[in-house]
Image: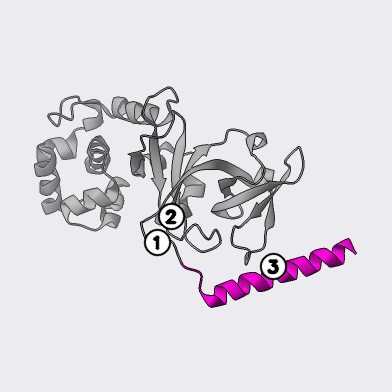
């Protein structure tokens, strides 16, 4: 029995590398790293040798020994799989920790986030960062794309703090909402009743119509606490956009007047 796939995953996680970072080290495609770790393919001999050289282990150890059950296999990285994962996960979730670790969900990972948001293996693949201004808590960052929340520009990163109960949602505040119907969206939440059985999601860009979601369809809510974007990335409204906003507002005012009458 070959332990190549299992060992590759183990030693990669010890270095806290993503599959993409491992692939770059080995000069292979990221998909190959995934195939090796899932044991859908066996690494070629030259790849095996490159892994062994990179992690200072023998080919025999890599292929025929379960490195997760053996301490001290890689010099300074002398920890077991359990102790490494325990430390990293506890650091991410320990609200009493002085430093809050923020997992980052880029756009390319958003599609799989709905299926993996509660999976420790999926979360361990996400890159992390820290912000000195964050109080201890449970945070996650999401990259947003599109113009529905202008003037917040497309490509911004929303740092959100976990909302444990939908009853904690504050009317008109902005949140990252993860739902079975829409996946990951960044919206302003308008609560329609005290029980919050339905929430209205509102875009800051008036060209986008608000819509409702059922609370039971929502799997996660993160209250926006910081917005990160590149300098100079703030978009300028062009004439057509401004005209569209004005026309949209005029239509809404007209509809409101007809309703009142």
Where residue 42 appears, as percent x and y from the top left, is 23, 50
| Mark 2 and mark 1 residues within 8 Å of each other at the beta carbon | yes
Identify the coloring. Answer: one colour
Q: Label 1: how many residues lie within 10 Å, few (<14), some (14-19) or many (20+)?
A: few
Say which residue label 2 marks.
156
Q: What is the number of the mark on residue 233? A: 1
User: What residue is rendered at 16% in x and 52% in y?
Assistant: 26
Image height check: is 95 above or below 36? above
Dot placed on the residue nearer the N-terminal end, 3 or 2: 2
Q: Quadrant of residue 204?
A: bottom right
- At mark 1, the secondary structure is loop
Where residue 165 appears, as percent x and y from the top left, is 62, 34
Q: Does residue 176 belong to the magenta stretch?
A: no
Residue 257 vs residue 86, the one in the foreground? 257
Image height check: is 215 above or below 252? above
- Determine if residue 42 is in view: no
Say which residue label 3 marks.
249
Residue at the outermost bottom position = 240
How far apart marks 2 and 1 lie (CA) works out to 9 Å
How far apart marks 1 and 3 lie (CA) works out to 26 Å
Quarter the N terminus occupies: top left
Image height check: is 259 above or below 52? below
Residue at the outermost top position = 96
The overriding secondary structure of the stretch rendered in magenta is: helix
Residue 156 vs residue 44, the one in the foreground? 156
Quarter the C terminus occupies: bottom right
Dot placed on the residue nearer the N-terminal end, 1 or 3: 1
Query: What segment is highlighted magenta in the picture?
Result: 236-261
Left or right relative to 86: residue 244: right
């Amino acid at each position: 029995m070959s332990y190549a796939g299992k060992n590759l995953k183990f030693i990669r996680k010890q270095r806290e590398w993503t599959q993409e970072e491992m692939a770059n080290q080995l000069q292979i495609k990221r998909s190959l790293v995934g195939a090796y770790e899932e044991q859908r393919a066996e690494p070629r001999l030259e790849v095996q040798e490159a892994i062994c050289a990179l992690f200072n282990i023998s080919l025999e150890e890599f292929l025929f020994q379960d490195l997760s059950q053996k301490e001290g296999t890689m010099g300074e990285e002398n920890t077991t799989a359990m102790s490494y994962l325990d430390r990293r996960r506890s650091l991410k979730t320990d609200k009493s920790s002085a430093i809050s670790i923020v997992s980052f969900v880029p756009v390319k990972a958003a599609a799989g986030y709905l299926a993996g948001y509660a999976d420790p293996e999926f979360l361990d693949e996400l890159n992390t960062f820290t912000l000195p201004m964050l109080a201890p808590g449970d945070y996650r960052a999401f990259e947003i794309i599109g113009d529905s929340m202008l003037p917040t520009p497309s490509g911004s990163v929303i740092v959100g703090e976990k909302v444990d109960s939908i009853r904690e949602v504050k009317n008109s505040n902005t949140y990252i909402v993860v739902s079975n119907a829409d996946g990951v969206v960044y919206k302003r939440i308008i609560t329609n009743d005290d029980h919050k059985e339905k929430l209205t999601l509102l875009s800051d860009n008036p060209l986008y119509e608000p819509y409702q979601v059922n609370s039971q369809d929502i799997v996660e809510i993160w209250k926006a606490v910081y917005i990160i974007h590149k300098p100079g990335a703030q978009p300028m409204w062009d004439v057509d956009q401004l005209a569209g906003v004005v026309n949209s507002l005029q239509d809404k005012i007209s509809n409101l007047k007809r309703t009142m009458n």
